[in-house]
Amino acid sequence: MHVYGSVNLAALLHNLSIARQHAPTAQVMAVVKKDGYGHGLVRVAKTLESNVDGFAVASVDEAVNLREFSVGKPITILSGFSSPDHIDLLTRHSLEPVIYCDEQFKMLESAKFDQLATWIKFDTGMNRLGFSIEDFDKPIERAMSNSSIRIKGLMTHFACADELNSQFTSQQIDRFQRYSSNWQHSVSLANSAGILRWPESRVGWIRPGIMLYGASPFPEIPAHQLGLKPVMNLYSRIISKKKLPAGESVGYGGTWKCIDETQIGIVAAGYGDGFFRSASSKAKVLIKNRKVNVIGRVSMDSLAVDLNQVPNARVGTPVKLFGDGLPVEDLAVAAGTIPYEIFTSLNPRTVTLTED
């Protein structure tokens, strides 16, 4: 076990409380898709269940998995369903798919089932999934004409809510509210960025995702300024240490050279575990509470670090890859990506997580 970590369940609950503080009258649909953003689907859901009103996942399989572990709260499937074979699973496990295209209606109209609660998704500018908001009445009337379909609510998704001064988000909110003004039932607009930044979207059901796991949805605002706490601490260890003279290079391609005599450590973590190669010679890790530079190219199973600032580090010394004191956002910036991708790229076959 070279890459290992811990999941702080108290921090998870704290971050949920931040979401509730921003939207105290809203119902909470905790987003736990993609294995709870890499934190463990069942672990996260079981921790949150008594404190939320429902969950959102990406697939039918994830939803069924939660039901098999006795999660009883409503479960929304954000990607809906794509096969008639799914309909039996949806009804058997009381799952709530999102409907966003005519093909899904056709599958439902050809199937026999007693009752299915659904969300209808409208496209207000994301141009991904959803019926055109200009055709507002059509999917609603189609759903209501089928006595087996119950509309749980209407939803949309923001394209630019992570941009602090985005006029586009205000336009999306306005577009949704304008067309749905006569709708008397549930709606859902706000993702994490909406919850934290766009008050007009904090209605109906909010959908906190990345913020639950202690990362900021905004490139310009670190998580701690939002009151969020990191949930995951990820570690590895030094497996080799050596001294190199000035002029020696390190790693594939010899892209990093020692200016002076350098103590280097080899850490058992690489892009095969989820530590991005694009972070080569840019990321930092935490050793003995000091930030240390990653040097040379990140390999599949290992990376090199400059130990000149921590000369007492040795083989076996723990190395924090991200977490308390070293935000995941820092690694994301170094890798040219976002915290979402870091979390969901962790390889569950090589990364072992336990609970704090």
Image (spheres, rainbow, N blue to C red):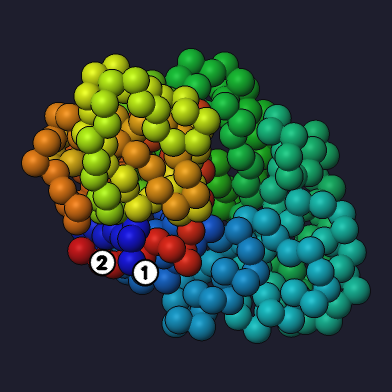
Residue beneath the point at 75% across and 75% down: 87
Give the crowd class for mark 1: few <14, some 14-19, many >=20 residues within 10 Å: some
Q: Position of residue 11 (x, y in %)?
A: 23, 53
The reply to whether discs 2 and 1 touch (Cβ–Cβ < 8 Å) is yes
Residue beneath the point at 80% across and 34% down: 134
Relative side of 321 to 198, left or right = left
Residue 138 visible in the displayed image: yes
Give the crowd class for mark 2: few <14, some 14-19, many >=20 residues within 10 Å: few
Residue 204 visible in the displayed image: no
Is residue 153 positioned above or below 181 on the image?
Answer: below
For label 1, the residue is 43
Residue beneath the point at 44% across and 36% down: 251
**Where is the C terminus found, in terms of image quarters?**
bottom left
Relative side of 113 to 349, left or right = right
Q: Amino acid at mark 2?
A: Glu
Q: Position of residue 314 (x, y in %)?
A: 15, 48
Q: Which mark is residue 355?
A: 2
- How many tags in the picture? 2
**Where is the N terminus found, in terms of image quarters?**
bottom left
Is residue 195 positioned above or below 198 on the image?
Answer: below
Q: Earlier in the sequence, mark 2 or mark 1?
A: 1
Q: Amino acid at mark 1?
A: Arg
* Front-lying residue, 134 or 158: 158
Relative side of 210 to 253, left or right = left
Q: Secondary structure at mark 1?
A: helix
